[in-house]
Image (spheres, rainbow, N blue to C red):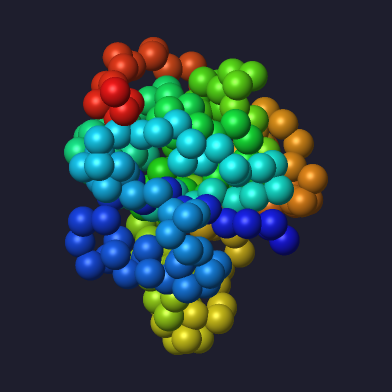
Amino acid sequence: MWSKVFLLVLDDRGAALRDSVKSYRKRYNIDSNREVNIREVIDNGGCTGKEFSDVTIDDKLIVIAHADARYLRAQKIGLMSPFEFVELLSILGLKEVGIISFKCCYLGAKSYLEDIKNELCSDIKIGYMSAYKRSAVTIFGHEGVGFIDSMIRLISAGLLKLPDRWRVNFVRGNTQAPRYSGKRALGETVYELPRESRRLNALRRR
């Protein structure tokens, strides 16, 4: 469906996240040119602003991190609000993408995706976003979301799952994504949260 798949690793601490990274590399044949690890970016002196400059509206971006319903957790940065995540995308040079798929526990349980949409400006175009509503674990190279879905994945060797409406929150972004029908994207709700202070200056290469 998508022309290319890119990977943004915000946190790779622990075997579970490292296994997830390996699974997505293999599933989508992602090479090093399409993967950004935020820890390595910081260790190497900061962003160039070109990390995701080649991403188009026909592409998919996968984000791997620890999370809860209110915050992403990025290694060497800490908790990230929706505003700070949008700022990070800008720092990494992203201009447009067809879908951002968050592979993080609980991030889709509340309004995080809607809040990202509210923070978007004309500089960044996103077709859709998705995130898990419950805890997630990698089983046979696929994600089990919540206890029942994880058992179904385990018994079927990763081939079967619950319907997406039980597993994933889908939100339409601020532009059209030609390669995606949007059939899995359900209704959207608008929330307003106060803007957080900026804490990403360390990412900018000087």
Residue 53 percent across, percent down from the top left: 55, 37
Location of residue 102 with respect to 141 vertically, above or below: above
- The single residue placed furthest to the front in the displayed view is 206
Residue 186 in sight here: no
Residue 58 percent across, percent down from the top left: 71, 48
Quadrant of the image containing the C terminus = top left
Q: Count of labels shown?
A: 0
40 to the left or right of 102: left
Which residue appears at 43% of the width and 28% of the height?
Answer: 91
Residue 164 percent across, percent down from the top left: 59, 59
Which residue appears at 21% of the width and 42% of the height?
Answer: 43
Of 28 and 173, the residue lying toward us: 28
Residue 78 percent across, percent down from the top left: 22, 35
Quadrant of the image containing the N terminus = bottom right
Of 33 and 119, the residue lying toward us: 33
Residue 163 in sight here: yes
Which residue appears at 29% of the width and 65% of the height?
Answer: 18
Location of residue 24 with respect to 140 vertically, above or below: above
131 to the left or right of 204: right
Residue 98 image-quadrant placement:
top right
Which residue appears at 43% of the width and 80% of the height?
Answer: 140
